[in-house]
Image: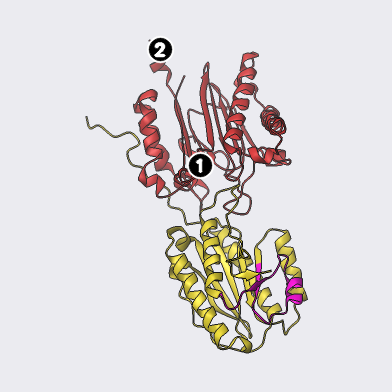
Amino acid sequence: MWKFICQSVEGTSHKKTTLGCQDSSFAAAHGTNLILLVADGAGSASLAADGSKLAIATGAALIKSFFDSGKQAQEITSDILRGWMSGIHAILEHEAAARNTSSREMACTMLIAVVGESSAAFAQIGDGAIVILDEQTYRPVFWPATGEFHNTTYFVTEAEFEMNIQLETFNRPINELAMFSDGLEMLALNYSTKTAHAPFFAQLFRSLRAGNAEELAEPMRQFLDSKPINDRTDDDKTLILATRIPHAETTL
Amino acid sequence: MAEQVPFGTSDFAENPEPRCPCVLLLDTSVSMKGAPLDELNSGLAVYREELASDSLAAKRVEVAIVTFGPVQTVQDFTTAEQFNPPKLEPTGDTPMGAAINQAVDMITTRKQTYRSQGIAFYRPWIFLITDGAPTDDWHSAAARVKEGEQAKAFAFFCVGVEGANFEILQQLTVREPLKLKGLKFRDLFQWLSNSQKSVSRSTPGEQVPIQNPTAPDGWASI
C-alpha cells in the first residue's frame, strides 16, 4: 500500500501573466500498484495547460486499462512504455487537429512511473525528474533532458518524440520515490555530479512518513509556494512524493 | 514531543547559475574616433548598469569584449555583476574576419568549460558592431558563422554604424544586419540588456520576448 501527496503550484512568473499553471500531475494507487504522472506544458504553447492535462488524462487511462485487463506491473516492458508515450502523442495530435491548430501548441514534457510490489517501470521525455530510493540512496532514474541549452527541452508532441524517450525497468521493489517538474530541478539535484541532493529528499520523506497524506497536502502546497523556493525559481512547481507503507502498518 | 513543521525548511542543492555568455565584438578602428567611440563607451556603461540591476541577469549573463583592430580581448568572460567596461580608444584597422574567428573560438571554449563543470547555459550571443568593412579575409569567418547558426551553436547579430559596408555585412551574417540610427548606442545596449534579461529567466519552450529594434522608436533601421 502507498502513501502519497501530489501538488502543482503556479510559478510566480506565471502569476504575473494570464498563463495559469501549465504543469499537470497525477498520483493514484491501483491495488498495490502506484501510478505517478507529470506533464509540464511548454512556455510559449498557447494551449500548454490543456495539453499537459490531456497528456496526463490519457496516460492515466492507458495505464488503468493495462491493469484492468488483468496484467501485472512486472509485465510492463520497454515496448509497453513506448506504446503509452505513443498513445499520448497520438491523442495530443488528434486533439490539436480537432481544434484546427498544431500539436506544437499543446507541447509538454512527460514523466511516467508505475511501481508494483516487486518491480518498477519508468519513462521520461524532456526535463523534470523521477528520484527513487534505491539501495538506501536517493538517485534520479534519468537525468533531465534539455538538449544543449538550459531553456530548451524535448516534448512528447514532437515528430521525433520516440528518439527522446528515456526508459528503465526494475525487477526489485522500489519503496520510495519522488517526481517533479523542472521548476524544482536546481533545488533538488546536484548538477556538477548529476546526483539527487539527498538532504532535500530525506527531509521531505521524513515528513511524509510521519504524517497523514490528506493533512500534508496543504503544508506541501505552502512549502512549494514559500519564499525560500520562490527565491530560487519563478517557474511552475510540481512535486509528488510517495512511500510504501510497510506491511505491519497495513494489517489490523 | 517537539512538533516539527512538516516541510518547514529544507536543505536545497547549491548549483551554479546557468549562464548566458555574450561576446561583444567592437570595431575600434580609427574611423570610430570621436563621437562614435564616445557614444559606444556610453552605451557600454548603460549595458553594465542595466544588467547589474537585474538580480538574475547580474549572475547569469557573462560578458566578454573583443576589439579590433588589431584583435584584442580587452575583457574575458565575466559575470555582469562583476563587469566593468574598459574605456575604448581608437586603434588601427578592421580585421573583422580574425575578430569573428576569435569570438567563435572563445564561445566554443567557454561551452567546454561549462560542460566540464556541470554549468547549464543558454544559447550564446555574438554581437558585432562596426562602422566599416573588413580589411582582412573574412570568408572563413562567414562560413563559421553560417555553420554555427545552422547548428544553433550561437546567435550572431551584426550592427552597422553609418558608413559600414552592408553588402559585405550581409554576406558575413545569417541574420539581417541592422543599421544603427545615428549613434544610438545607448538605446542599442538597453535593448541588448533587456533581451538578455529575458533570456536569463526563460524556461523551455518559451518564446523569449525581444522587442523589435526596427520599430519606429527603435534604435535600428532596415
- Whether labels 2 and 1 belong to a single chain: the reply is yes
Q: Residue at x 49, y 41 (%)?
A: A236
Mark 2 element type: loop
Pointer 1 local density, CA inside 10 Å: few below 14, some 14–19, many at least 20? few
**Which quadrant is the C terminus of chain B positioned in?**
bottom right
Q: Chain of mark 1?
A: A
The answer to whether residue A54 is seen in the rendering is yes
Where residue A192 appears, as percent x and y from the top left, is 51, 53
Q: Is residue A203 left or right of residue A181?
A: left
SS assignment at label 1:
loop
Q: Amino acid at mark 1?
A: Thr
Q: Chain coloured red: which letter? A: A
Badge 2 crowding class, 10 Å Cα cut-off, few under 14, some 14 to 19, many 20 or more, is few
Please state, as top left, top right, bottom left or bottom right, where the N terminus of chain B lies in the image.
top left
Q: Nearer the viewer, residue B19 or A166?
A: B19
- Of the numbered discs 2 and 1, the one sitting upstream in the chain is 1
Considering only vertical position in the picture, is A17 above or below A115?
below
The mark found on residue A251 in the picture is 2
Q: Extreme left residue here? A: B1
Which stretch did the figure color magenta?
Answer: B157-184
Going by the picture, which residue comes out furthest to the top? Answer: A252
| Residue at x 68%, y 58% (from the top left corner) | B152
Q: Is residue B120 magenta?
A: no
Q: Chain letter for yellow? A: B
In this rendering, the answer to whether B205 lies above or below B39 is: above
Which residue is the site of mark 1?
A18
Locate residue A64, reporting x and y percent. 60, 19
Give how far across and how far down residue B74 sits, in percent: 54, 80
Q: CA distance from mark 2 to mark 1?
A: 48 Å
User: Is residue A74 visible from the viewing direction of this image?
Assistant: no
Q: Give amino acid for label 2.
A: Thr
Residue B164 position, x and y percent, is 69, 80
